[in-house]
Image (tube, helix red, strand yellow):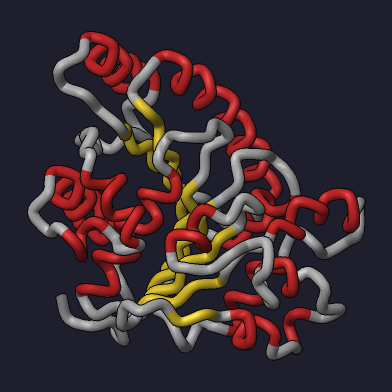
Amino acid sequence: MNIWAVANQKGGVGKTTTTVSLAGLLSAKGYRTLVVDMDPHGSLTVYFGHDPDTIERSVYSLFQVPNIASSDMPRRVIKQTRFEGLDLLPASTAMATLDRQLGTQDGKGLVILRALQQLADRYDYVLIDCPPILGVLMVNAMAACQSLLIPVQTEFLALKGLERMMRTTAMITRARRSPLGLHIVPTMFDRRTRASHEALKQLQSDYPEQLWDAVIPIDTQFREASRKGVPLPIMRANSRGSIAYRELLTWLQEIYPADSRAAES
């Protein structure tokens, strides 16, 4: 089971769009895919038709179990989406209280890892949509994943936010027992603007080893897909955004091949 986290400490850079688009592509290819909403705002949860304010069981429920490794709660929290092979671990607004509730309790940084270990026989890919704040939720996501995708909007302020995210990643990587693959994904690239081109050149200069060598372009159809609750690659397979995410997925699967149980593409 491949576990990819999508994170950035700056909001509005395309984390949820990246999670949804890659998950849509994977499920359409026949891979059993789970998306995990770790953001108390619940954008991913809303995308798939659930209300984070009223949902009964969510990622929050996993943190309330004394021993998640021996609990059936992970399976009870899962919600099926209307897309075959694509399931959701939803968020709830109560997750915003976890840092205050948990304090310094031991073992709470591995709750998601242990929950996903119970689901390893059910999914080929797990994609985790992270909150933009460093806390117990982001720590859990980065402890659970094998690779971290950092979407970065191609504009100056987003580049400054990336510096903070890279410091956070370095800190958490030192605490991990296994290496963490790190990949920067330039998003919202507008080829008509000088600012986008300059930002991309800066990324290429500063992060040559971590940077994906293509871009996710601005595509107004992402907004329409979100309104309809459908991953854009499923709604409009030939849109600019869909083509770009398909290229990103191909690149990622060359680095992290699916195991032998996964569907043929």
Residue 36 at x, y percent in the picture = 53, 65
Q: Residue at x 74, y 73 (%)?
A: 61
In the displayed structure, 221 sits above or below 80; it is above
The quadrant holding residue 31 is bottom left
Toward which corner of the image does residue 106 lie, by quadrant? Answer: bottom right
**In the image, is residue 72 above or below residue 163?**
below
Return the residue nearer the eye: 107 or 130: 130
Q: Position of residue 181 (x, y in %)?
A: 45, 49
Left or right: where does residue 181 sit relative to residue 131?
A: left
Query: With respect to residue 107, does 10 lie above or below?
Result: above
Is residue 16 at all visible to an observer of this figure?
A: yes
Q: How many marks?
A: 0
Please state the horizontal and vertical placement of residue 262, each as a whole percent of the image: 29, 82
Look at the image and tell me whether residue 177 can be seen: no
153 vs 130, left or right, is: left
Q: Residue at x 44, y 60 (%)?
A: 47
Residue at the (68%, 68%) spot, across then down: 54
Q: Judge left or right: residue 201 versus residue 144.
A: left
Q: Quadrant of the N terminus?
A: bottom left
- Name the one closer to the observer, 209 or 109: 109
- The answer to which image quadrant residue 194 occupies is top left
Residue 228 locus on image (x, y percent)? 31, 60
Q: Residue at x 41, y 14 (%)?
A: 156
Looking at this rendering, what residue extends furthest in the left direction? 238
Which quadrant would the C terminus be assigned to in this image?
Answer: bottom left
